[in-house]
Image (cartoon, rainbow, N blue to C red):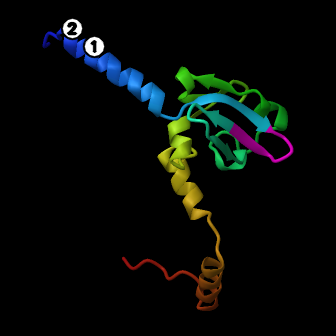
Amino acid sequence: MADLTDAEIEAALERGRLAQKTEPRATSARYDRKSGRIIVELTNGCTFAFPPRMAQGLETATDDELATIEILGAGYGLHWEALDADLSVPGLLAGLFGTKAYMARRAGQVTSPAKAAAARANGAKGGRPRKQA
């Protein structure tokens, strides 16, 4: 293992301090029953809100369960003890509301007028063709 100098250690600590100042992290989080959204206040002064039905582990939660939010890891995570659910603040800001598999399942559930019309047209032809061996 390479020996680190005091200057390298101090530079790494400074990079960490800078990241904490610039990266958006949660300062507070709450569930707004009226709007049906989780509202997260960020360190950069912005506010982020999302409907819990979009997030893995929160889809079927009650209002009381959603209301008990903990902020974890210096603001990098949100935790619901009663639901055993955790979400990453950077992930939420990037539009990731769960694991890769969860997001893939949600993507397949999206409906649009074009998708509905294509499904009707395919159904009129007898449905999805059988796979050829």
- 56 horizontally vs 38: left or right: left
Q: Is residue 72 visible?
A: yes
Q: Residue at x 65, y 85 (%)?
A: 120
Report how far apart the C-alphas of labels 2 and 1 lie in the structure.
6 Å
Q: Residue at x 66, y 50 (%)?
A: 54
| Circles 2 and 1 in contact, beta carbons < 8 Å | yes
What x and y, as percent, mark residue 45? Answer: 61, 36
The answer to which quarter of the image holds residue 42 is: top right
Q: Tell me: residue 105, above or below residue 50.
A: below
What x and y, as percent, mark residue 125? Answer: 59, 91
The answer to which quarter of the image holds residue 133 is: bottom left
Which residue is the site of mark 1? 10
How many neighbours does mark 1 have within 10 angstroms: few (below 14), some (14-19), or many (20 or more)? few
Q: Secondary structure at mark 2?
A: helix
Which residue is the site of mark 2? 6
Give the residue at the far bottom of this rendering.
125
Q: Amino acid at mark 1?
A: Glu
Q: Residue at x 55, y 60 (%)?
A: 107
Q: Residue at x 20, y 12 (%)?
A: 7
Magenta range is: 32-39
What x and y, as percent, mark residue 27? Answer: 63, 27
Q: Amino acid at mark 2?
A: Asp
Q: Tell me: residue 115, above or below residue 75.
A: below
Q: Secondary structure at mark 1?
A: helix
- 61 horizontally vs 47: left or right: right
- On the rendered image, what quadrant is the N terminus found in? top left
Q: Is residue 84 visible?
A: no
How many neighbours does mark 2 have within 10 angstroms: few (below 14), some (14-19), or many (20 or more)? few
What x and y, as percent, mark residue 105? Answer: 56, 56
